[in-house]
Image (cartoon, rainbow, N blue to C red):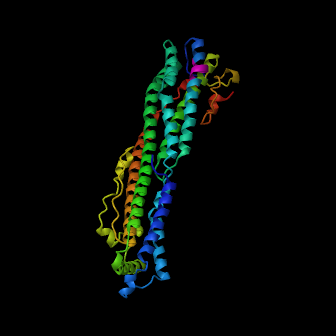
């Protein structure tokens, strides 16, 4: 089992709230700030800058909503599994055997055609249909695995971000250092110097960090592939954490897109084969039927 | 126009045409309906083509069902002494497999 989209939605909200708390905590007044005469109280414009984090976080995870709920695949997988069992099971084979048993002494042009082009093709058609339905089942399973792993990884990344925001603290007695950094980063954010990864590029902060946790999504096409949580988010202020979060979310999106493309390749290959050998997947309608 | 000749015991032709083949067609018809449910229950991101794959599989199962039923109709007519392309009374056609066929019946073959 894994996360559903609703749970990831909640995690995004939690992370935004934790980011807000971190900003307010780090910009809080401390006596040492006045003592060193460098502290400038936060302005409303600062609040606006802080709130600019929200859309960045939202945008970073918007791709998640393009996936269906992983659970919705279950019914489809089960339906195809049951269909396959019906086709390759004893019931259908028994009926075909009954027909074959009647045919030994059938003669005439129509009888020959009926036997050769219809009945005798039925067994191979049934085998091929079994393979076809197994491929469809695997396609659904792969789609579910890609979806589920994407959500799980997004959830793990958001958990890491939530933890990082929660752990951010001013450095106590010399809090002005944090305040100064914050002020610098806010200005940098406002002027676009710290490029948002959500717009396509990674910030300098993010570029210097090591993103080791981006799950290899190629593994997603293998059902039940082990999940790998994203790496720790670097940073010692909310902007750095946000940059890293947005960057890693972008990495996850790219990896998920690639997994989707790989899945398309696999499905199209099977679909192409299916359509190229259509006559092998259904018994030919015999001329005995009057075509 | 005379259709292809079938020389066999009338009882056997009738049994295959009016019971066994319609029963096989019924299995496929139900399988096709289940596949339809599988196709409609989940989509996936645009371009994933899973739906197209499932729909192609559904179409081939439906084709097997239709071919089985059409063969049954032809044999049932022959068993009743008609040519496979003749129009016949409804009560001479194969027994109803009690399913809704997913694709339209062949009007030429199933005309009464």
Q: Nearer the viewer, residue A196 or A51?
A: A51
- Rendered residue at 35%/75% (across/down): A172
The x, y position of residue B107, in whole percent, is: 64, 33
The part of the image, by quadrant, that contains residue A136 is top left
- A179 shown above or below A85: below
Any magenta on residue A49? no
Q: Which secondary structure dominates the residues rendered in magenta? A: helix
Q: Is residue A107 visible?
A: no
- What segment carries the magenta color? B16-21
Instruction: Residue A100: give x, y in percent of width and height.
Output: 49, 18
Is B19 included in the stretch rendered in magenta? yes
Of all residues, the one furthest to the bottom in this rendering is A37
Residue A147 visible, this angle: yes
Q: Position of residue A25 (x, y in %)?
A: 43, 73
Using the image, determine if residue A255 lies above or below residue A41: above
Of residues A205 and A181, the one nearer the viewer is: A181
Image point (49%, 50%), residue name: B44
């Amino acid at each position: 089992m894994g996360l559903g989209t609703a749970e990831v939605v909640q995690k995004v909200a939690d992370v935004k709230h934790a980011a807000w708390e971190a900003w307010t905590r780090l910009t809080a007044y401390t006596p040492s700030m006045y003592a060193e005469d460098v502290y400038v109280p936060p302005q409303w414009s600062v609040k606006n800058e802080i709130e600019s984090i929200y859309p960045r976080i939202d945008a970073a995870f918007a791709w998640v909503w393009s996936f269906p709920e992983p659970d919705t695949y279950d019914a489809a997988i089960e339906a195809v599994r049951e269909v396959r069992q019906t086709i390759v099971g004893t019931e259908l084979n028994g009926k075909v055997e009954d027909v074959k048993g009647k045919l030994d002494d059938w003669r005439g042009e129509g009888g020959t055609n009926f036997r050769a082009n219809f009945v005798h093709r039925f067994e191979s058609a049934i085998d091929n249909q079994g393979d076809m339905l197994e491929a469809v089942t695997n396609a659904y399973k792969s789609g579910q695995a890609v979806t589920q792993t994407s959500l799980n990884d997004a959830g793990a990344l958001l958990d890491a971000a939530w933890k990082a925001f929660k752990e951010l603290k001013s450095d106590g007695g010399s809090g002005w250092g944090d305040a100064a950094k914050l002020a610098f980063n806010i200005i940098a954010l406002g002027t676009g110097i710290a490029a948002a990864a959500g717009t396509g590029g990674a910030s300098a902060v993010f570029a210097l960090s090591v993103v080791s946790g981006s799950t290899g999504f190629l593994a997603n096409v293998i059902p039940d592939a082990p999940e790998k949580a994203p790496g720790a988010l670097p940073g010692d202020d909310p902007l750095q954490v946000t940059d890293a979060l947005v960057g890693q979310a972008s990495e996850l999106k790219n990896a998920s897109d690639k997994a989707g493309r790989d899945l398309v390749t696999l499905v199209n290959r099977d679909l192409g084969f299916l359509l190229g050998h259509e006559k092998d997947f259904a018994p030919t309608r015999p001329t005995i039927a009057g075509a | 126009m005379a259709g292809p000749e079938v020389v066999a015991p009338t009882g056997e032709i009738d049994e295959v045409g009016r019971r066994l083949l319609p029963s096989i067609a019924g299995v496929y018809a139900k399988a096709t309906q289940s596949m339809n449910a599988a196709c409609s229950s989940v989509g996936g991101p645009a371009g994933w083509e899973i739906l197209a794959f499932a729909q192609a599989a559904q179409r081939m199962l439906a084709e097997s069902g239709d071919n089985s039923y059409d063969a049954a109709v032809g044999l049932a007519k022959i068993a009743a002494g008609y040519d496979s392309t003749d129009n016949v009374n409804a009560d001479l056609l194969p027994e109803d497999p009690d399913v809704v066929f997913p694709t339209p019946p062949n009007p030429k073959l199933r005309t009464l």
